[in-house]
Each structure stands twice: as C-alpha cells, then as structure tokens.
Amino acid sequence: MKKKKNVAGIFFGSLLRAFVVIGAFVIIALGVIIVKQVVSDGEKNRQSGSNTATYADGQRDELLTAEPKKDKNEADDKSDKDKKEDSKKTLSKDINYDAPVIVLNGTETPGLAGEWVNRLKEAGFTNVQPGNYFSETTGTKVYSADGSGAALTALFNDAESVTGMIDQVETDMPLSDGQIVIVISNSDDVLSK
C-alpha cells in the first residue's frame, strides 16, 4: 500500500531537492573561482620570474649571492680577517682600497658582478658596486683614468689594464675619472665553472 503524498510533503521534498541542486552549483562555482585564482597566481609568479632582466644587475646579484647562515659549530679553515689579509697579499701596497670600484658583468651569467663585488670586499675594498656591461668583451678589462687600477689585474685570470677611455665603457652606471671600472669576461666567470 502506497502512501499518498500531501501537498506539504511534495512542496518540502521539492524544496529540499532545489537546495541540494543549488548547493552543488555553489560548490562548483567556488571550485572554479579557486582554480582561476591559483592559475592566475601561477602566471604572475612565472611572469615576475621572467622579468628579472628589468632589474639592475646589482639587485639580482644581492639576491643571488646572499650567503647561507653557517652553523656555529661549523669551523672555517681561516677567519674572515685571514682571508682578507691573504687577498691583500696578492695586490700591490700602493692600492687605494677606498677608491670607487664598479664591477660590470660582461657575460650572460646572472649574479657574476655581485660575486666579484663580494670578492673585492673580502680583499679589503670598501666602495664597490655591481652593474651591467652592454657590449661584448673578449677578456676582463680594468679601466682607470690614471692607471691606478692596473694592480687589480692580479686578481683575475685574464685581465688587461686600460688607462683612460673610462668614458667609453658602455654601462648603466654613472662613471667618473676617479673610478676604477672592471668588466668581467667569460674567462673570469667563477659562477658557471
């Protein structure tokens, strides 16, 4: 024997089904919104990662050359002071370690200028900045208006000292006669080796 459905039962049954269908649509809509947001965030991250060329070489270099923190129990063979002293030994005593030095990345290796900035600071230089070089280079060149940068060639594998012509260096950095400008070439690309 079947029960007869009354009007109220039919109404509430239909209402319950409608709520279930509407709830399903809401869940599907929220899922679509979440997926769109995730895809959109992924696109933004990919685009921001590929736009690093718009940053100055120094900005990339600071991020790429940040040293990880060392464990206090980790012993180094030499202290930082000893490393600086060893670097200074390879250079002439006539070098002005406070002279403004600009290191330009003449390679396609990101972060190379920053690595050399760190090495020069370890050697005792106090005023060193990274930058970009906009032409091809066949070897590392150390430019200085008065030849004061010639002694720095000892720090590089294949460096040539160039006296004068500092104003002809193609870079995004402001240059002046008192500066030493180093253009790093592939022969001194310490990051890709």
Image (cartoon, rainbow, N blue to C red):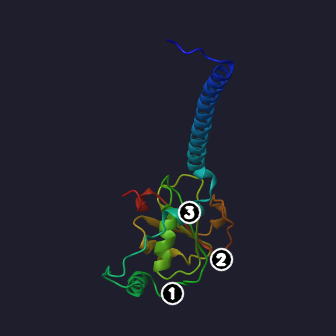
The amino acid pointed to by label 3 is: Leu
- Going from N to C along the chain, the mark reached first, 1 or 2, is 1
Counting other residues with Cα less than 10 Å from the Cα at mark 1, is it few (<14), some (14-19), or many (20 or more)?
Answer: few
In this rendered view, identify the residue nearer to me: 103 or 154: 103
| Residue of label 3 | 104
Mark 3 or 1, which is nearer the eye?
Answer: 3
Query: Which x, y percent locates residue 174?
Result: 69, 66
- Going from N to C along the chain, the mark reached first, 3 or 2, is 3
Q: Is residue 2 visible?
A: yes
Residue 56 is labelled as none
Residue occupying image coordinates x 59% and y 30%: 24
Residue 94 is labelled as 1
Residue occupying image coordinates x 68% and y 18%: 7
Q: Are marks 3 and 2 in contact (CB under 8 Å)?
A: no
The amino acid pointed to by label 2 is: Gly
The amino acid pointed to by label 1 is: Asp
Mark 3 or 2, which is nearer the eye?
Answer: 3
User: What is the quadrant of residue 37 in the picture?
Assistant: top right
Q: Is residue 83 left or right of residue 98?
A: left
Query: Which x, y percent locates residue 87?
Result: 41, 81
Q: Is residue 42 left or right of residue 69?
A: right
Q: Is residue 183 visible?
A: no
- Going from N to C along the chain, the mark reached first, 3 or 1, is 1
Q: Is residue 118 left or right of residue 58?
A: left
| Residue of label 2 | 178
Query: Which x, y percent locates residue 69?
Result: 43, 74
Query: Relative to 6, is 131 above or below?
Result: below
Q: Marks 3 and 2, Cα distance to the nearest angstrom?
A: 16 Å
In this rendered view, identify the residue nearer to me: 46 or 133: 46
Query: Which x, y percent locates residue 126?
Result: 56, 81
Q: Marks 1 and 2, Cα distance to the nearest angstrom?
A: 16 Å
Counting other residues with Cα less than 10 Å from the Cα at mark 3, is it few (<14), some (14-19), or many (20 or more)?
Answer: many
